[in-house]
Image (cartoon, helix red, strand yellow):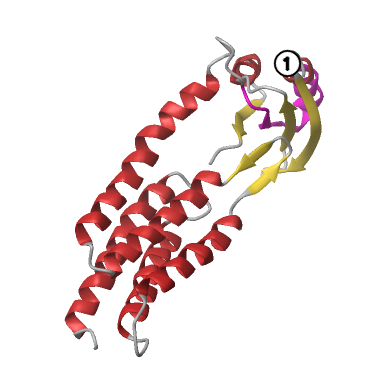
Amino acid sequence: MTMPGLELLIRVGLATVLGIIIGIERQWRARVAGLQTMALVCMGAALFLILGAYTFRPEPNPTQVAAQIVTGVGFLGAGVIMKQGFSVTGLNTAATLWATAAVGALAGAWMWREAITGAAIIVVGNTFLHPLATRMDRARTRAGREIPPADYVFEVVCTSDAEPNVRTLLTPALTRSNFQLSSMRATATTNPNEIALRIELSAAARDDAVMEDAIRTLSVDPAVRSVSWTTGSN
């Protein structure tokens, strides 16, 4: 039994389009696995499922191929999970890859309603649950809720002659409470009169207010060109 060429194009095309839709959301959030990765994973899963359903003889077994897709994408997802100090990043990206492969497999099996629904759930979940999760992470400990440890990166660009003063202001601002200074280093920028400071910190519990206070402290200094902070995210 062989699949007509038009039907093959429709199934693989649907998988690719759904992968692109999922990938747009990931690319917008600047994740490691973005537009191209999601499109390829979704399309590849569809092709493998079609391969299992229409190629093997004497008894095609698409379920066996689907199981191998799950395993293979699991290894792919493991490659985007990284541990940085106390923080683990990439878990949501890995889960999105895994779910995207399921969408592709559904499209390959021509369960198009389920495939479209799955893609919609992935995009909606990543879009609307992400802000909710961020607000929950930023909430202080209350009612026995445990806040996981976190790593922070604080970056400042200032004039070269202001570096000692900026260091003096930053050290007490960033190392109060339960924060520990991991490293602080200065690098040159494209402007010979400016310097970039990168400060890495770790905390037993996430507390973004410390970062915001440090920004307010530096924002009044005219020698500071830019200041920003980031923490681990998925």
**Residue 119 appears at what percent x and percent y?**
30, 52
Q: Is residue 31 visible?
A: no
Q: Residue at x 24, y 55 (%)?
A: 114
Q: Secondary structure at mark 1?
A: helix
Q: Is residue 79 magenta?
A: no
> In this rendering, is residue 125 above or below 34?
above
- Please state which amino acid type lies under the numbered disc 1: Ala
Vertical relation: 133 (above or below) 22: above
**Along the line of sight, the residue nearer the viewer: 39 or 64:** 64
**Which residue is labeled 1 in the image?**
173
Of the 4 image quadrants, the one containing the N terminus is: bottom left
Q: Position of residue 107 (x, y in %)?
A: 27, 65
Q: Position of residue 98 (x, y in %)?
A: 46, 56
Which residue appears at 73% of the width and 15% of the height? 173
Question: Which quarter of the picture shows residue 198?
Answer: top right
For mark 1, does the 10 Å Cα neighbourhood hold few (<14), some (14 to 19), or many (20 or more) residues? some
Measured as percent of width and height from the top left, residue 224 is found at 65, 25
Residue stretch in magenta: 147-169
Q: Is residue 69 left or right of residue 108?
A: right
Answer yes or no: is residue 68 visible: yes
**Left or right of residue 166, residue 22 in this image:** left
Q: Quadrant of residue 170?
A: top right
Total of numbered circles in the picture? Answer: 1
Q: Is residue 164 magenta?
A: yes
Q: Is residue 9 left or right of residue 82?
A: left
